[in-house]
Amino acid sequence: MGLSIRNRLTGTVTEITSGAVMGTVAIDVSGGRSITAAVTMDAVKDLGISVGSAVDVLIKSTEVSLATGAVAGISIRNQLPGTVSGLETGGAMTVAHIRLDGGGEITAAITRAAATDLGLAAGSTVTALIKSTEVVLSTA
């Protein structure tokens, strides 16, 4: 199956916190980083996810925000530090390619104005911010 989602990281489920309808799933991905996904408990059951399961973490590039440093006092659970490895700029949008600390790469599609305001260039240090509700899980 082909997907238009650019960001795909592979990891292992380390914790599942169950709720009545929704829960959170913590996944260890390369480089010792952890990503949290907020998903329905039905999805956890349907996918057969349990601690130790291998999963793919999928994130649309339009759901990745960027900051030019560490961010405190924010509810966004997933904060991945990295370095801009390249930029593709069009009339309205910019796609930033981020080499994550510890390995792996993700892309962020942000407005051209935001990229300019942040002063992004190859080599810029950034933190990719992803809400847990925007993380999709897939199993083989």
Image (spheres, rainbow, N blue to C red):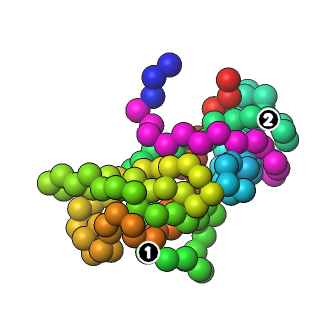
Q: Is-magenta flag for residue 8?
A: yes
Residue 13 is left or right of residue 115, and the answer is right
Furthest-left residue in view? 91
- Number of labelled discs? 2
- Estimate the x, y position of residue 126 in percent, counting from the top left: 46, 69
- Estimate the x, y position of residue 6 in percent, counting from the top left: 44, 40
For the residue marked with disc 2, what is the amino acid? Answer: Ser
The residue depicted at 59 percent of the width and 52 percent of the height is: 103
Asked if residue 42 shows in the view, the reply is no
Label at residue 53? 2
Q: Name the residue under label 1.
A: 68
For the residue marked with disc 1, what is the amino acid? Answer: Thr
Furthest-bottom residue in view? 73
The residue depicted at 23 percent of the width and 67 percent of the height is: 113
- Estimate the x, y position of residue 89 in percent, counting from the top left: 22, 54
SS at mark 2? loop
Task: State which quadrant residue 92 falls in.
Answer: bottom left
The residue depicted at 14 percent of the width and 54 percent of the height is: 91
Q: Is-magenta flag for residue 1?
A: no
Relative to residue 101, is residue 17 depicted above or below? above
**Bounds of the magenta segment:** 4-18
Asked if residue 54 shows in the view, the reply is yes
